[in-house]
Every structure is written in structure tokens, then in C-alpha cells.
Image (spheres, rainbow, N blue to C red):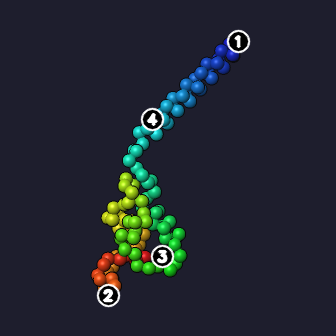
Amino acid sequence: MKVYIEHLRAERERAQAESKEAIRAAERKRLRDSRIQCDTPLVEQIEALMRSLPPAQRNRLWTMEEFVARLHGRYNARPCAGEVGIALRRLGWTRLRDWSQDGGGRRVWLE
């Protein structure tokens, strides 16, 4: 009988521990920032974008507006151009100006 009672106590303690852990998990989920729209960092988004494109499109000059239109921001639908620029520099991209007749001096990015 004593073994049975000890077994019941152990089961109750285990159930209480599981219940406490479930409450903690629910609290962590509730406290998660609800403003976050995209958890993927911009560097990873840019790498995925470049992997998804054929070489002819990947190896051309890109404008900042093209990047901003294709990427997702953390708190907004579109990322800030400054954050995109920082991510591009981390990936080794360089910024230059297109002084051709069609470019008109606009800034472009080259991998």
C-alpha cells in the first residue's frame, strides 16, 4: 500500500510540473512581440532572393527600390532602405552610380 501511495504522489508531482511548464510556455507565447511580421533577417532574405533568380537577372545592376519591393520588413510590410543597404554591404555588394544615358546618375548595387 505504501508503494502505491508513493506512486500516486510521484504522478501528482509530475502532472503539476507539466502543468507549470505548460503555463510558462503559454506565457512566453503571449509575451512574444505581436508587432513582428517577419522573423527572417534581411541578409537571409537577400540570399534566398538571389538563389531563386536565374544568373542573367542575378548579375545585373539593382536599384534600392527593387530590393525594398521584393523584401519583407520586420515590423512593416517593407524594410527600411538603410537596413537593406547594411545587409547588402554585409554580403559584399557595392554601391555605384549609373552615369549612362538611361541611368541618369542613379545609385545602383552590384554583387
Foreground label between 1 and 3: 3
* Mark nearer the viewer, 1 or 4: 4
Q: Quadrant of the C terminus?
A: bottom left
Q: In the image, is 53 to the left or to the right of 6?
A: left
> x, y (%) of residue 6?
64, 17
Q: Nearer the viewer, residue 83 or 65?
A: 65
Numbered label attached to residue 27: 4
Q: Residues within 10 Å of mark 1 (few under 14, many from 20)?
A: few
Q: Label 1 belongs to which residue?
A: 1
Q: Residue at x 41, y 39 (%)?
A: 31
Amino acid type assigned to the residue bearing label 3 in the image: Arg
User: Which residue is identified by label 3?
Assistant: 58
Marks 4 and 2, how far apart at CA = 59 Å
Q: Is residue 98 left or right of residue 1?
A: left
51 or 2, nearer to the observer = 51
Any part of residue 77 in sight: yes
Amino acid type at circle 1 is: Met
Mark 3 vs mark 2: which is more N-terminal? 3
The local secondary structure at tag 1 comes to: loop
- First in sequence: mark 1 or mark 3? 1
- Tell me, yes or no, whether the two marked residues, 1 and 3, touch with CB atoms within 8 Å: no
Give x and y (percent) for residue 107. Answer: 32, 77
Above or below — where is 12 with respect to 26?
A: above
- Amino acid at dot 4: Glu
The answer to which quarter of the image holds residue 74 is bottom left
Q: Earlier in the sequence, mark 4 or mark 2?
A: 4
Element type where label 2 sits in the image: loop
Please, is residue 20 above or below residue 58 in the view? above
**Which residue is rendered at x = 31% and y = 85% of the image?**
99
